[in-house]
Image (cartoon, rainbow, N blue to C red):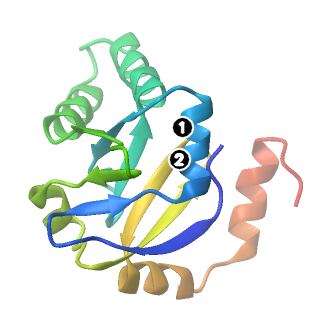
């Protein structure tokens, strides 16, 4: 699982160094390919290890084409999904269209979120973290999942 957050910089060529802790996880899993997507709901880019992405694709396929919302979501998220190989120096290339969509400039925050990694503009991440939240909203949802906090 991916945990923690790290401040990094995107170079002039659009390359981003993956934190060593995350590279080690990928190495143990024998995965060098990440799928980069615009999640549609958040102001970041999401990097899925290939196996996690394949599970998402299977879940979408299992719902078939009968539901318009599933078709639209599958179409939108797949249209801009990009494969990116972790190079020998532990970097991935983030294409310009995805960098632009998430307003990724030089300074970014890489956030581990269980089975995936999010890449945020540093200011947007700080703004997201600073938002007021009602702990009771989270406690109720977590309790529904059997998670006690």
Image position, residue 13 (x, y; %): 14, 64
Cβ atoms under marks 1 and 2 closer than 8 Å: yes
Label 2, secondary structure: give it. helix
Extreme residue toward the right, this view: 148
Extreme residue toward the left, this view: 97
Image position, residue 33 (x, y; %): 36, 33
Q: Residues within 10 Å of mark 1 (few under 14, many from 20)?
A: some
Extreme residue toward the front, this view: 88
* Residue positioned 52% across, 63% down in the render: 111
Quadrant containing the N terminus in the rendered view: top right
Q: CA distance from mark 1 to mark 2?
A: 5 Å
Residue 100 is left or right of residue 141, and the answer is: left
Q: Residue under circle 2?
A: 23
Residue 5 is left or right of residue 85, and the answer is: right
Q: Residues within 10 Å of mark 2 (few under 14, many from 20)?
A: some
Q: Which mark is residue 26?
A: 1
């Amino acid at each position: 699982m991916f945990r923690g957050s790290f401040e990094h910089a995107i170079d002039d060529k659009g390359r981003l160094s993956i934190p060593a802790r995350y590279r080690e996880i990928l190495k143990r899993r024998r995965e060098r390919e990440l799928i980069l997507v615009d999640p549609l709901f958040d102001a970041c880019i999401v990097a899925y290890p290939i196996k996690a992405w394949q599970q998402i694709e299977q879940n979408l396929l299992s719902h078939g084409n009968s539901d318009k919302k599933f078709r639209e979501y599958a179409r939108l998220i797949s249209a801009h999904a990009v494969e990116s190989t972790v190079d020998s120096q532990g970097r991935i290339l983030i294409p310009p269209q995805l960098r632009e969509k998430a307003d990724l400039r030089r300074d970014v925050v890489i956030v581990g979120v269980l089975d995936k990694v999010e890449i945020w503009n540093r200011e947007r991440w700080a703004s997201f973290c600073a938002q007021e939240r009602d702990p009771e909203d989270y406690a109720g949802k977590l309790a529904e999942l059997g998670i006690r906090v």
